Image: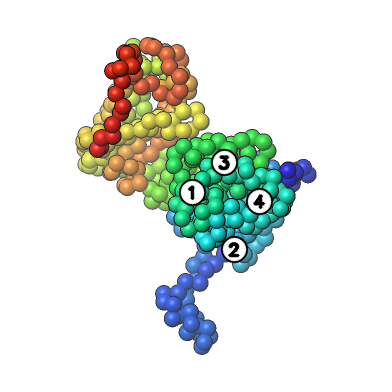
């Protein structure tokens, strides 16, 4: 097994990394430029002056909109691309799963591709032979391992690639959005193995649009915007800035309100206060299953119709439940110079624990369009104990149990949705 880095140095150090690509409108322009030496291209800056380090046992998530430079960064770190400027210091074996099919040959069998791909990421012949059966078992492709890769589905290719990479015993594991291709069960299997790798002291560089998985898996998050690092810090903070980016909020514009920290938006209509109550009045502690109200005190300087939303998160920052008036097919009207109270009533069918409530005002079913006010963790509450029958897991679902003779058992049938 490959030894972990023991000298305390980062397993990965990136200093002032830059990468540019020439973009041609037509294939003929490339030929014309080569023959006559006249530029017929434009330059796309994929990354510019990017610096960070990844410590041993640390997991860093990489967030950003499409085209922000996430995949380019991972290709540079893994050695698939060479930088135009800057340096990358790697200490130990780095393995990863980038774009589907990277390093694979469709003409070769799965067995042959394991050998080729494993050597590409630095495994020796002895290591490949020792771990071959484990790789095949994890990929669940034993019945297809001698078939040509061109006959594999995209999900099967992802399985094979992940299985090879995770069995290379790297000091750093890199994973891109390719995991999204697999089925839900195999995704859970991969994420469990990634967590085990992290817990054993491995380092992770993880790119995903799934904010929840980044919060759950990573210690830090880097937010890329237009090829530059816009933020490097805690995943929760990175997520809030990412939400601002996708909502089109300009941080340089006066879109924050000191009276409501952790909030942003155009603020022509805003939320002034959030109150949680049960049948006895305002409270911060409730029982699982108890009916509560979430009241939003709003004021507006415009006459408009907006969507009002709530989002409940657990103590890990994971989204537990969210809804808004657009999804509920309700209308929320606001008049200039007036204040109104918007109320949501719901049972707290969640497991005991601590939670936060994020609230929002926007013009569509998400806050991406015309975000008037997004207030993160505007209120907090705790669920302590059960008001009805207890359950295990994250949330309560009404269940009915029946028992009857086997002769009455009927096989389930598929129905059209």
Label 1 secondary element: helix
Label 4 and label 1: CA atoms lie apart by 23 Å
* Residue at the extreme right of the image, as rendered: 7
Decide which of 136, 389 is in the foreground and name it: 136
Q: Is residue 185 visible?
A: yes
Dot 3, how many residues are within 10 Å of its Cα: few (below 14), some (14-19), or many (20+)?
some
User: Decide: marks 1, 3 in contact (CB < 8 A)?
Assistant: no
- Nearer to us of marks 1 and 2 is 1
Residue 138: mark: 3
The residue that appears at 52% across and 68% down in the rendered structure is 21
The residue that appears at 64% across and 35% down in the rendered structure is 199
Name the residue that disc number 1 marks. 156
Question: Disc 4 or 1, which lies upstream in sequence?
Answer: 4
Dot 1, how many residues are within 10 Å of its Cα: few (below 14), some (14-19), or many (20+)?
many
Q: Using the image, determine if residue 10 lies above or below residue 277.
A: below
Spot occupied by residue 107 in the image (x, y as percentages of width and height): 52, 62
- Nearer to us of marks 4 and 3 is 3
Name the residue that disc number 4 marks. 94
Dot 4, how many residues are within 10 Å of its Cα: few (below 14), some (14-19), or many (20+)?
many
Spot occupied by residue 341 in the image (x, y as percentages of width and height): 27, 28
Dividing the picture into quarters, in which one does residue 103 lie?
bottom right
Name the residue that disc number 2 marks. 81
Question: Disc 1 or 2, which lies upstream in sequence?
Answer: 2
Spot occupied by residue 309 in the image (x, y as percentages of width and height): 32, 34
């Amino acid at each position: 097994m490959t030894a972990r880095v023991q000298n305390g140095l980062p397993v990965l150090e990136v200093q002032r990394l830059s990468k540019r690509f020439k973009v041609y409108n037509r294939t003929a322009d490339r030929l014309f430029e080569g023959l006559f030496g006249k530029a017929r291209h434009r330059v796309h800056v994929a990354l510019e002056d990017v610096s960070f380090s990844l410590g041993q046992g640390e997991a860093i998530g990489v967030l950003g909109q499409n085209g922000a430079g996430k995949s380019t960064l991972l290709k540079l770190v893994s050695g698939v691309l060479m930088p135009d400027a800057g340096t990358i210091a790697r200490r130990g074996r780095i393995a990863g799963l980038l774009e589907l099919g990277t390093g694979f040959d469709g003409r070769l069998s799965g067995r042959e591709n394991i050998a080729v791909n494993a050597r590409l990421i630095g495994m020796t012949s002895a290591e490949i032979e020792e771990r071959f059966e484990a790789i095949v078992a994890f990929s669940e492709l034993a019945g297809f391992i001698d078939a040509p890769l061109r006959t594999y589905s995209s999900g099967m290719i992802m399985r094979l690639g992940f299985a090879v990479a995770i069995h290379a015993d790297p000091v750093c594991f890199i994973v891109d959005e390719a995991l999204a291709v697999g089925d839900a069960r195999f995704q859970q299997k991969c994420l469990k193995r990634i967590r085990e790798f992290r817990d054993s002291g491995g380092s992770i560089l993880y790119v995903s649009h799934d904010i929840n998985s980044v919060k759950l898996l990573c210690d830090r998050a880097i937010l890329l915007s237009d090829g530059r690092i816009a933020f490097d810090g805690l995943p929760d903070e990175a997520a809030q800035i990412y939400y601002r980016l996708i909502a089109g909020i300009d941080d340089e514009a006066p879109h924050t309100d000191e009276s409501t920290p952790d909030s942003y938006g155009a603020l022509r209509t805003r939320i002034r206060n959030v109150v949680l109550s049960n049948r006895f009045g305002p409270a911060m502690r409730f029982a699982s299953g108890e009916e509560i109200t979430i009241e939003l005190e709003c004021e507006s300087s415009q006459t408009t119709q907006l969507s009002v939303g709530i989002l409940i998160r657990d103590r890990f920052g994971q989204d537990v439940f969210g809804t808004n008036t657009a999804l509920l097919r309700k209308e929320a009207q606001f008049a200039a110079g007036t204040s109104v109270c918007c109320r949501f009533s719901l049972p707290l069918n969640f497991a005991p624990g601590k939670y936060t409530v994020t609230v929002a005002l926007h013009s569509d079913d998400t806050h991406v369009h015309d975000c008037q006010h997004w207030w993160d963790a505007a209120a907090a509450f705790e669920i302590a104990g059960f008001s009805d029958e207890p359950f295990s897991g994250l949330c309560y679902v009404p269940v009915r149990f029946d028992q009857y003779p086997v002769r009455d058992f009927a096989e389930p049938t598929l129905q059209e949705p």
